[in-house]
Image (cartoon, rainbow, N blue to C red):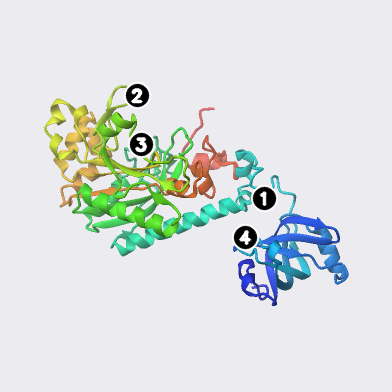
Amino acid sequence: MLEQRTLTKETVEKVGETVTVFGWVHARRDMGKLVFFDVRDASARLQIVGVPPELATDEDREALSALRAEYVVAVTGVVQQRGAKQVNPDQATGTVELLAKQVRILNESKTPPFEIDNEERQAGEELRLQYRYLDLRHERLARNLRLRDAVVTFFRDYMHAAGFIEIETPILMKGTPEGSREYIVPSRLHVGKFFVLPQSPQQFKQLLMVAGFEKYFQIARCFRDEDQRGDRQPEFTQLDFEMSFVDAEDIYQFTEAMMIELVRRVTPEKKITQIPFPRMTYAEAMERYGNDKPDIRADKTDPNELGFCWVVDFPMFERDEEGNIAAKHHPFCAVHPDDRALLDSDPLAVRANAYDLVMNGYELSSGSIRIHRREEQKKIFDILKISPEDQQRKFGHMLEAFEFGAPPHGGFAPGIDRIVMLLAGEPNIREVIAFPKTGDARDPLMGAPADVDARALHEAHIKLEN
Ligand code: ASP
């Protein structure tokens, strides 16, 4: 450590003491002969009263006149109580200020491309993302990432306390059919072969149930090469989990209790519209609300209201854009027990044992009870018109695993980005991701995606068309 450091947040308990704070210059204000500025560190922000001219050394004077926004400084001084009128109740250190005795500049800063101390005047998103490390200095974004950390920590603790084990699954894998285009990764060692990035750990988590873990979870990164929308990103994070020997009711009850506890612990100022969360079937949701993610809040203008609801009994199949029959969620969902007889005669009328959790009109999570018998899985693949050869080539490992004592199982995968977005009251998930992509799936900070050099292409056995 550089020397005895006091965090700005700690100064409220150190009135009368001489301390040294380290941080960034935030909002410099010159008032006559006195210079005021804030020092911002990771803990909070503290008002500094510059060394009064009559007490300043040449060095102090020089430092004070050189100080600009975002300079890195060490300030030594005496913590003093602010007068009653100067107290700022909105700031963690609003009752105190530091009367500087010495100001040292540890590093300079160019003038940032946008103001850090003014939330109102936000720059355009391209610029914000290009200088994301400066954008993240904004209090709001820093607060969002801390909230995200609190949410993830809560989930990890909750899952462990409930007997789940966190297991990492591969990022380099073979395709999983969950309805999206996959990112592909060439293999250097196996000419002409490719890995794909997981759309979700779906198949691995099911295989972990076959392996006998019974309760798995993972804070899992998922990758989907889709056209982007406001609440979508090419990579996003799920609380992915799977349980054995459960039915849908177990998943509802477990998840519902967890979400209620999350809100109570992490954002206690929020209130939930209705507990237990209302449940409706997909058919009811479509009829009553015209969509499958109804916003059930009583007051949609109240930023503190959270309207959770369950939408259950999703259709098993749908027609895709080309008119072909496709899985509505994914082909591993179990068929609703009452609808087995319809599989041959009227597959589009078949319901899956599949459910969504919805909050404020957003789909927070999808899940289902899964197929765990080879013949049933084969039957679904047949209906999806996947040829026996393709079934074997693409999913032979799943069909085979189901022949070795696969237990009944099911799971769910709440989207962390959306949960944090809604708890933070942000309009899109980019505001709660440290380094998100733009709406058209680019990273302006690093400039990705980017060209790779000819040698790397050659080693990956790739020839570009032009
Ligand atoms: N893998 C599914 C998804 O990403 C979630 C699940 O069925 O558990 O939507």
The residue under the point 68% across, 51% down is 117
| SS type, badge 2 | loop
Amino acid at pointer 1:
Ile
Name the residue beneath numbered marker 1: 116
Point out the tag, 1 or 3, that comes first from the N-terminus.
1
Query: How many angstroms separate mark 2 from mark 4 (CA)?
Result: 53 Å
Residue 317 visible in the shown view? yes
Which is more foreground, mark 2 or mark 4? Answer: 4
Q: Quadrant of ligand 1?
A: top left
Q: Do the residues under discs 1 and 3 have CB atoms within 8 angstroms?
A: no
The residue pinned by badge 3 equals: 294
What's the mark number on residue 321? Answer: 2
In space, the residues marked 1 and 3 are separated at their CA atoms by 37 Å
Marks 4 and 1, the one that precedes in the sequence: 4
For marks 4 and 3, give the CA distance: 38 Å
User: Mark 3 and mark 2: span between their CA atoms?
Assistant: 24 Å
